[in-house]
Image: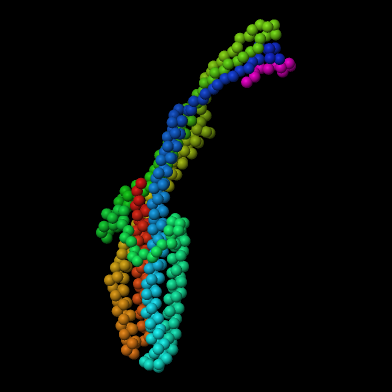
Amino acid sequence: MAANLPTDSFDLNQEGMTQFSIGISQMFPRGDSLALVKQQKQQLAARQPMLRKDREARVKAVVSQLWLEATRAQQSIRRIERDRSLFEQLADVAEVGYASAFGMTRQEDVIRAQLELTRLEDRLTDLRLQEEAAERQLSEWLGHAAVMPAAREFPEIALVAPELFVGPERPSRQAWYERVRQHPVVLAVDRKIDAMATGIDAAKQKYKPEWGVSAQYGYREDDPMGGRRSDLFSVGVTFDLPVFTEHRQDKSVAAAASRHESVRYDRETLVRELIARLETNWAKLSRLDERIALYEQRLLPELNEQAEASLSAYNNDDGDFAEAVRARIDETNASVELIALSAHRLQVMAEINYLLSQA
């Protein structure tokens, strides 16, 4: 810099105080603030692998559930198309019986048969819409691979922690907690809590003085008589004293402490949410297993017997056509419902596997 220039003449050698100077200065951070800031950044960076693991587990669950939804629609379509031939046969039998005036066939039986065929077509159209919608959603993750061939059977999905699902008793909340605390998203929040705690220590460093050193060299011109003037060298140390702390330092520490408590509260809320979702899905899985067993062991066999008996009675002119059609519809509906229950069970298991995932 140029210092102490005379304003009357701006002559560089008029005054002895006029000089050109160059200097350097260095400030030193307060206390351990530099190391603490570095530590905090590293702790925040350590969250990213955990978040990546959570993202992978979440994508796996979402893709599995969408694929199961598409497969459910495909299998339901195949089941209804298989039964449609039976309704077409019933319609043909009713038309022939009505045209020949043989037996007890009435016009309303023919109309009822055609109506049920139309309803089946509408149901197939709705199922194809559901299948296409699921495939379009899958294309967000899988691209062209989302349009997949139909799966004949649902795959087996293994639970990642089967020991928690052994026996009819629900696992204790402590058992859920011990598992959930290792979830990637919870571990990511733990890293954030550590970073916020380090932020409190960093804020406390503001109570310590900030130091600085400086050195400066000043060049001076010779005096008007030609006499030589000595150049000047200066060195100094500066520091501040944070005495009145209630307006800055105290409030900075309080703000850092509030952020720390907020993240801790978010962690507890997250853990409770994960445990609640686990308990909900555990209950769903138990009830779905019961319903599937009921459908497979009792309901479907009984409906099949009822449909066969109603059709046999109608063919022997001892039953009502509407009753025969209704019995066959009930059997078809139960079969489609069993497919939906099986798909829902696997979707619940995919959700449970996400909730039980670990880093």
In the rendered image, residue 142, in percent from the top left (x then y), is placed at 43, 56
Looking at this rendering, what residue extends furthest in the right direction? 8
Q: Is 24 rendered above or below residue 306?
A: above
Query: Which residue: 40% across, 44% down?
Result: 49
User: Taking the image as drawn, is residue 67 in sight?
Assistant: yes
In the rendered image, residue 238, in percent from the top left (x then y), is placed at 53, 21
142 or 347: nearer the eye? Answer: 142
Query: Which residue: 71% across, 17% down?
Result: 10
Looking at this rendering, what residue extends furthest in the bottom direction? 101
In the rendered image, residue 99, in percent from the top left (x then y), is placed at 42, 91
9 or 243: nearer the eye? Answer: 9
Main SS class of the magenta portion in the image: loop
Q: Name the image quarter holding the N terminus.
A: top right
Query: Which residue: 35% across, 80% down?
Result: 327
Q: Quadrant of residue 113?
A: bottom left
Q: Is 179 rendered above or below residue 316?
A: above
Q: Quadrant of residue 50?
A: top left
In the rendered image, residue 35, in percent from the top left (x then y), is placed at 43, 31
Coloring applied to the structure: rainbow
* Residue 8 magenta-highlighted: yes
Q: Is residue 26 left or right of residue 74?
A: right
The mark tally for this picture is: 0
- The span picked out in magenta is 1-10
Q: Is 242 rendered above or below residue 355?
A: above
* Residue 327 magenta-highlighted: no
Query: Which residue: 38% across, 78% down?
Result: 85
User: Taking the image as drawn, is residue 200 in sight?
Assistant: no
Q: Quadrant of residue 130?
A: bottom left
